[in-house]
Amino acid sequence: MRHSRRVALAALLGSALTLAIGTGAHAEDKKITLGFAQVGAESAWRTANTVSVKSAAADAGINLKFSDAQQKQENQIKAIRSYIAQKVDVIAFSPVVESGWEPVLIEAKNAKIPVILTDRNIDVKDKSLYVTMIGSDFLEEGRRAGKWLEERYKNEPGPINIAELQGTVGSAPANDRRAGLLEVIKNDPKFKVIASQSGDFTLAGGKQVMEAFVKTYGKKINVVYAHNDDMALGAIQAMEEAGWKPGKDVSVVSFDATKGGFQAMVAGKINVDVECSPLLGPQLMTAVKDIVAGKQLPKRIVTEETVFPMSVAAEVLPTRKY
Ligand code: GYE
């Protein structure tokens, strides 16, 4: 009895020792844990972005904690707080709106957890609250769309009436895609934004808002300026149900340049799609590793993008990755 107890004890000590050595060896190449607070699943863009983040984390050997805020800031704040409590190595998030982030970011700073912004920017005075911002320049995207409109209507006297389907209220892409357009058209009084409403970046939202625009403004509308492809696709449905020919009697301008957007261009229903890439995962994981390794990062990492007019859609569609 005694003997067997001693044997059992020795075995236990032995395995405890192995465990300790094992942990020790792991300590050096300890996996980085990244807490990522996603906006939601509102669009094809977002779905592609989530896939990109998850697969890039797996490829980089990073342990990813992922949460979906269903387009609500309060949910994102909760997720960030839980990552702080879990003492993750790095927090990254795509802020649903621009304002209101100071308190939770101060908590992260006090806990010495570096924060990366990805996709959407925030409006904070103290830029030390985040390390870097990786994503597109939405203001430039809006300007690109505006320039396309100027070129398209340069030989027409106007008025050119624009109906705007805005993204999520208070979000960086909605604010900046609008501002970029207004900046370009402000010196050309023939362009008028006659209607603006949010469709929350969703197909259903875009359809609903466009149905109301069709009723209120009818054929006065010359241009539908949709802040993303999902809303453009919803608006196209609404226009077709009203017997309109989107892409022909109304110009449709959109953003993202997803496969769905391209298919609508090939069908002649979206006239121009300003690219915005959701494939930010690999860049994000590189930044995470660099931060943990103590490297200095630029404050802003801008994604490279272009503009696709309808005329190139059929040729480019097979190469689209999202
Ligand atoms: O354009 C839209 C998505 O933040 C750039 O969010 C992103 C935007 C994108 O819902 O489709």
Image (cartoon, rainbow, N blue to C red):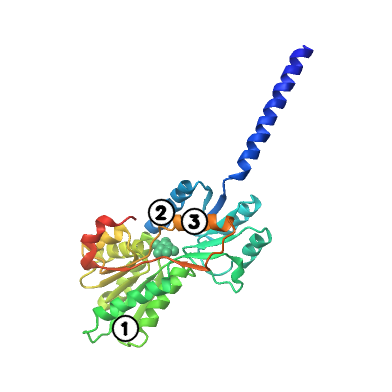
Residue holding disc 3: 286
Residue holding disc 2: 47
Q: Where is residue 233 in the image (x, y as percent from the top left)?
A: 31, 62
Mark nearer the N terminus (1 vs 2): 2
Task: Classify mark 1: helix, strand or loop.
Answer: strand
Q: Where is residue 302 in the image (x, y as percent from the top left)?
A: 44, 67
Residue at x 20% of width, y 71% of height: 248
Question: Please, what is the three-letter code of the amino acid marked with disc 1?
Answer: Phe
Residue occupying the far right of the picture: 2
Mark 1 vs mark 3, CA separation in Å:
43 Å
Q: Position of residue 152 (x, y in %)?
A: 24, 78
Mark nearer the N terminus (2 vs 3): 2
Mark nearer the N terminus (1 vs 3): 1
Judge by depth and name the residue closer to the eye, 9 or 116.
Answer: 9
Question: Please, what is the three-letter code of the amino acid marked with disc 2?
Answer: Thr
Mark 1 and mark 3 in contact? Answer it, CB < 8 Å: no
Mark 1 vs mark 2, CA separation in Å:
34 Å
